[in-house]
Image (cartoon, rainbow, N blue to C red):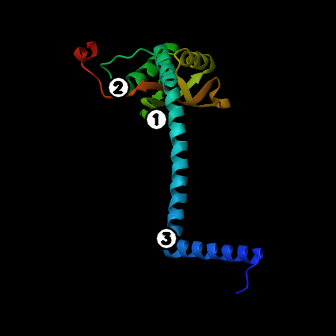
Amino acid sequence: MKKMSLREQVIAVTAGVLILFYVAYNWFGLGDLLSELRTKRTALVTLRDQYAAHRNSLRFRPVVVQEYERYRSYSIPRDPTKDPADEFSEYINNTIQRIDPTRRPALHPTELDEIEGVESYEQILLPVDITIELAPLVQFLKTIDQERLLIRRLEIRCRENQHPNMSVKTTISRFVSIDDLQGPRSDEEARR
């Protein structure tokens, strides 16, 4: 038998390795194993990204909670025996009455809105419609700003036949603790 040249040896070894790889890949499940490893590697990368994102959000959580607590300290005082939504509606109504006693605002039912990324607080939304003159409207908006309440929507319309009155539709919101939303407490529970 004739001895193979180096080139023929390389071709034979390469062909043998390819045949062995083909047999292992198709008959012994190497293809399935590689596919499963690719899937697990992708899942691991996704989980690492999620972990990094959650870790990052947890790092900033104390700052967010501290800022909400600081905001809460600026906000209108709470009576723990009253429902926060009713108390907020009453506060807005009284504020408008104090600024312009001749006006009767239309207060719509309040809604709760979750705050993304903050589990311990929600926003109370209060839609308000009122017809009011410019000076009392400016005073009302200043009061809202001073009380650190948020204006989520503000629509002001003025028609020539209504001058100097303006039709105002607004949605005002305030933050409220989830604990406060659990319901009004008795005076005795509030003292504890």
Q: Residue under circle 3?
A: 29
Amino acid type at circle 2 is Asp
- Residue nearer the viewer, 100 or 77: 77
Residue at 50 percent of width and 61 percent of height: 36
Contact between marks 1 and 2 (CB within 8 A): the answer is: no
- Element under disc 1: strand
Quadrant of the drawing holding the N terminus: bottom right
Density class for disc 3 (Cα within 10 Å; few <14, some 14-19, many ≥20) is few
- Element under disc 2: helix
- Residue nearer the viewer, 110 or 55: 55
Residue at 35 percent of width and 25 percent of height: 179
Quadrant of the drawing holding the C terminus: top left
Q: Residue under circle 1?
A: 113
Which residue reaches farthest bottom? 1
Badge 1 or badge 2: first in the primary sequence: 1
Contact between marks 1 and 3 (CB within 8 A): the answer is: no
Instruction: Residue 22: give x, y in percent of width and height.
Output: 58, 75
Density class for disc 1 (Cα within 10 Å; few <14, some 14-19, many ≥20) is few
